[in-house]
Image (cartoon, rainbow, N blue to C red):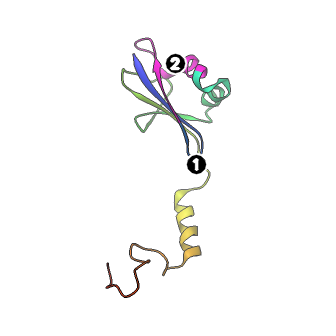
Amino acid sequence: MRVQLVYAGAQRQVLEVQLDLAAEVSIEQALPDVADVLGEDVVAQIRDGGLEAGVWGERVALARVLRDGDRLEFYRALRVDPKVARRERFSRQGARATGLFAQRRPGSKSGY
């Protein structure tokens, strides 16, 4: 059974690896194979709950059984809430510098 393992250890650094696993294994049972690729420290974070597991973008428990062709992902916690970050960016830019048509060519019509 082949599973694609995806992990982003740092910002803009994504690791994608194909894992060959025995049929009908859970994520928990696949962690020794994951440790061969990512290292024991990452697997320790997964077991402690510091990293969450997901399959095809949906968060799942470690007891979930993997199927052939699944995309196994591990997620880090967000450092900043996206809503708060957008609000802060907007307050720094001001209302005039934001939006789809904020940077127009000189002399052009509105909306172009």
Identified by mark 1, the residue type is Leu
Most extreme residue toward the right, as rendered? 41
Q: Which secondary structure lies at badge 2?
A: helix
Residues drawn in magenta: 15-36
34 left or right, relative to 65: right
Q: Residue at x 56, y 62 (%)?
A: 85
Residue 48 image point, x, y percent: 64, 30
Residue at 62% of width from left, 36% of height from top?
Answer: 50
Q: Report whether residue 36 is seen.
A: yes
Q: Disc 1 designates what residue? A: 78
Residue 9: x percent and y percent?
60, 38
Question: Which mark is drawn over residue 30?
Answer: 2
Going by the picture, which residue comes out furthest to the front?
A: 106
Q: Give the residue furthest to the bottom.
A: 107
Total number of numbered discs in the rendering: 2
Instruction: Tell whether position 25 is magenta.
Output: yes
x, y (%) of residue 69? 36, 24
**Left or right: where 90 falls relative to 65:** right
Q: In the figure, 42 relative to 9: above or below?
A: above
Residue 110 versus residue 100 in the image, above or below: below
Lower sequence index among marks 1 and 2: 2
89 vs 24, nearest the viewer? 89
On the image, the x and y values in percent for residue 93 come to 55, 75
26 or 21: which is nearer to us? 21
Q: Residues within 10 Å of mark 1 (few under 14, many from 20)?
A: few
The residue shown at (42%, 39%) is 57
